Image (tube, rainbow, N blue to C red):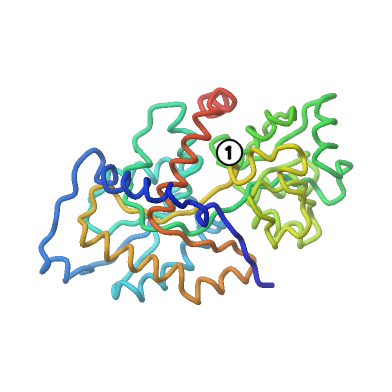
Amino acid sequence: MTMSHPTRVTRLGAGAALAALVLVSAGCGGGGSAQEMSKEDCAKYPEKDVTMIIGRSPGGGHDEYGRFLVPLLKKELGGNVIVKNVDGAGGRVAASQVYEGEPDGYTIHLVEPNGLAALQAVEDVEYDLAKFTQLGVVNDRPSTFAVPAGSKYKTFDDLVEASKKKPLKFATSGLTSPNFVNGVIAAKEAGLKFTPVPHEGSAEAITSMVRGDTDFTVFSGDSIAEAVDAGDAKALVQFGEEPLDLLGDTPMAEDVGLGDLAGVLTTNLMLVAPPALPSCLKKTLTDAVQTTLNGDEFKAFGEKGRIVSPGTPEDAQQLIKESVATYEKYADVYRKYLTS
């Protein structure tokens, strides 16, 4: 099945131009300015392995995207690229490590910035998302509510009404998960009452929901689609701007009275480097990333049930700006979960 996924990055317009200016002025180092390199030194790059840090444990969807991209980037860079998984605190450990890392072109990061933006909105963190060196958007995935295939809750309204009598069990991969935070925001606007049930990872949380140990879960559309295709789950509502082919006729946010959250409650994957990356290295890495993300091999990856929606560094900066604004707006709604 060929998958298409229109995303917010296609409508950035003037906002992207503004974000580009922000990127130039802010995207330099963990508080420092980019140190330029000579043409001779730039021409030698890369002289050693480039490490892609993935802020999740091996085996999940996040890791799958990274490991698929690595050999493609290796080909474009003309040097070796390796994977290093740095799990912990919903990606915070990895992001902090990269943010404070040496801007020498030998560290890149596959990051899901949404949960990090949520944390940044409610407490002091070791990074500033706007200051990473943006290389490109990998995808933009709608958060999606789902219940077990045999659930008595057939619609999102059923879920909301039942929760008014007794809070329902919300399976999550962690209280810092961006899909959990997105679920909290949607629940607040809909009047859905719940008790969070954290699990070790997304697979465990989805399995808990499928078994009926918990009542519902919220994950990205591609993750939910796998369970739906297997006959294990039913998707109740998706929060993209446009319908996701993978989710068939699943209702959209506006269908359940939450149209203001359409295209807002999503999660992204992006490729970034430490702040203050010299301009010649930034160009080399950006060119390699953009060629990879817009190439036929990565597009074919989207035909295997994964969401592929590439964007530019300017698109990435704009998406981060939107995420930070959203989570700042709803900080009082989810703060107790992230800081408990």
The crowding category of the residue bearing disc 1, from other C-alpha atoms within 10 Å (few below 14, some 14 to 19, many at least 20), is many
From the top left corner, tell me how far across and down residue 307 is, in percent: 59, 61
Please give the count of numbered marks on the rendered protein: 1
Figure check: 1 above or below 235? below
Position of 74 with respect to 228 (left or right) is left
**Quarter of the image that includes the C terminus:** top right
**Quarter of the image that includes the N terminus:** bottom right
From the top left corner, tell me how far across and down residue 167 is, in percent: 77, 27
- Determine the secondary structure under disc 1: loop
Along the line of sight, the residue nearer the viewer: 51 or 158: 158
User: Residue reaching furthest front?
Assistant: 14
Position of 313 with respect to 66 (left or right) is left
Along the line of sight, the residue nearer the viewer: 135 or 17: 17
| Residue at (70% x, 48% y) in the render | 238
| Residue at (77% x, 62% y) in the render | 230
Mark 1 highlights which residue? 174
Amino acid under label 1?
Answer: Gly
Residue 98 visible in rendering: no
| Residue at (44% x, 44% y) in the render | 320
From the top left corner, tell me how far across and down residue 303 is, in percent: 62, 71
Figure check: 151 above or below 176? below
Figure check: 185 above or below 224? above
Along the line of sight, the residue nearer the viewer: 230 or 258: 258
Q: Quadrant of residue 174?
A: top right
Along the line of sight, the residue nearer the viewer: 7 or 42: 7
Residue 20 visible in rendering: yes
From the top left corner, tell me how far across and down residue 62 is, in percent: 52, 56
| Residue at (63% x, 33% y) in the render | 185
